[in-house]
Image (spheres, rainbow, N blue to C red):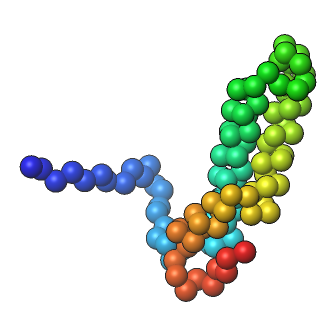
Amino acid sequence: MSDLSISSVVAPGMTTTTGAGRDPNKVRDAAQQFEALLMGQILRSARQGSSGWLGNGEDSSAECATDYAEQQFAAVLAQQGGLGLASLISKGLTPAGSGEDSK
């Protein structure tokens, strides 16, 4: 059998950073944004799976407003701890001893 390896794909001129070069605040912010995106998708899926409380879904302005409200709600939930994914992701991406305290 052959050994499979995946080489990293980096555009010419780009540099890669190791775990030691990561800013813990940026990592936490990216993890919170990812969690907010995931929760927004969960909320959207739950809303589309039901008949909806705003009507039959033919009103595009109501759907736009609902989408925006779901995005904002998901962002606030992620900032307040949400599902706990942001802290797990940031712990996994931040090297030990970098001074990042879990919130």
Query: Which residue is more in the foreground, 17 or 12?
Result: 17
Task: Tell me the quarter of the image containing the C terminus.
Answer: bottom right
Q: Residue placed at 25% from the left, 53% from the top?
A: 5
The residue lying at 57 percent from left, 71 percent from top is 91
Q: Residue at x 44, y 49 (%)?
A: 11
Residue 21 position in % (x across, y down): 53, 74
Q: Position of residue 10 (x, y in %)?
A: 42, 52
Res 71 quadrant in image: top right
Q: Is residue 35 above or below residue 18?
A: above
Res. 26 visible in picture: no
Furthest residue to the left?
Answer: 1
Foreground: 94 or 69? 69
Marks counted in the figure total 0
Residue at the (65%, 46%) spot, across then down: 38
The spot of residue 20 in percent (x, y) is: 51, 77
Relative to residue 80, is residue 3 drawn left or right? left
Figure check: 69 above or below 79? above
Q: Where does residue 64 sit, x and y in percent of width and height?
A: 85, 27
**75 w.r.t. 95: above or below:** above
